[in-house]
Image (cartoon, rainbow, N blue to C red):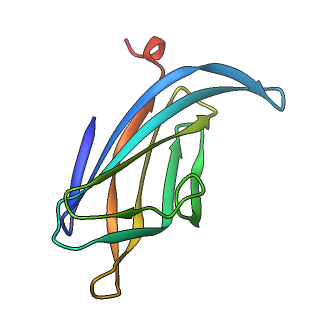
């Protein structure tokens, strides 16, 4: 598990390899990741957008931007946390993801970015 704190918001990530499959006649390697966002600040914050950089050992970096996470824009009060699980497929057994969330401090209406720490995606069979 990796974690990082930005502006009192802690983002922790744990990734797992869940097997391979075939997509458009190519073998892909599938991973899930669980993210927990802890609000250790003094103000309530809302996650509004996400930005991902997906690194696949066999392909150029892929950028993904979107509203919220898994269809939600969670509001996280001080001392509370929010967790969700998602997935990623790569064309190689090695890669990584990193990015940031754009969040709004609801007390001040200030928009700020929270770093999603870089985490590795790897199929255990590929490690020697």
Closer to the camera in the image, 58 or 73: 73
Closer to the camera in the image, 109 or 15: 109
Closer to the camera in the image, 24 or 114: 114
Q: Quadrant of residue 40?
A: bottom left
Residue 3 location (% of width, % of height): 24, 46
Name above or below for residue 31 compared with residue 113: above
- Residue under the point 59% across and 50% down: 60
- Determine whether, in the image, residue 27 is placed left or right of residue 94: right
Q: Quadrant of residue 30?
A: top right
Residue 128 location (% of width, % of height): 37, 11
- Residue under the point 47% across and 11% down: 125
- Determine whether, in the image, residue 11 is placed left or right of residue 47: left
- From this viewpoint, which residue is outermost toward the right? 24
Residue 87 location (% of width, % of height): 56, 38
Q: Quadrant of residue 59?
A: top right
Name above or below for residue 39 compared with residue 84: below
- Residue under the point 64% across and 33% down: 91
Quadrant for the N terminus in the image: top left
Residue 73 location (% of width, % of height): 50, 64
């Amino acid at each position: 598990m990796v974690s990082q704190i930005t502006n009192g918001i802690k983002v922790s990530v744990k990734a797992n390899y869940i097997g391979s499959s075939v997509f458009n006649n190519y073998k892909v390697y599938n991973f899930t990741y669980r993210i927990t966002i802890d609000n250790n600040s003094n103000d309530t914050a809302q996650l509004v957008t996400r930005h991902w950089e997906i690194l696949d050992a066999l392909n150029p970096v892929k950028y993904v931007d979107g509203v919220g996470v898994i269809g939600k824009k969670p509001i996280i009060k001080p001392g509370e946390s929010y967790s969700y699980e998602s997935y990623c497929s790569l064309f190689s057994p090695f890669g990584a993801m990193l990015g940031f969330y754009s969040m709004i401090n609801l007390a001040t209406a200030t928009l700020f970015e929270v770093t999603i720490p870089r985490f590795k995606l790897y199929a255990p069979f590929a490690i020697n």
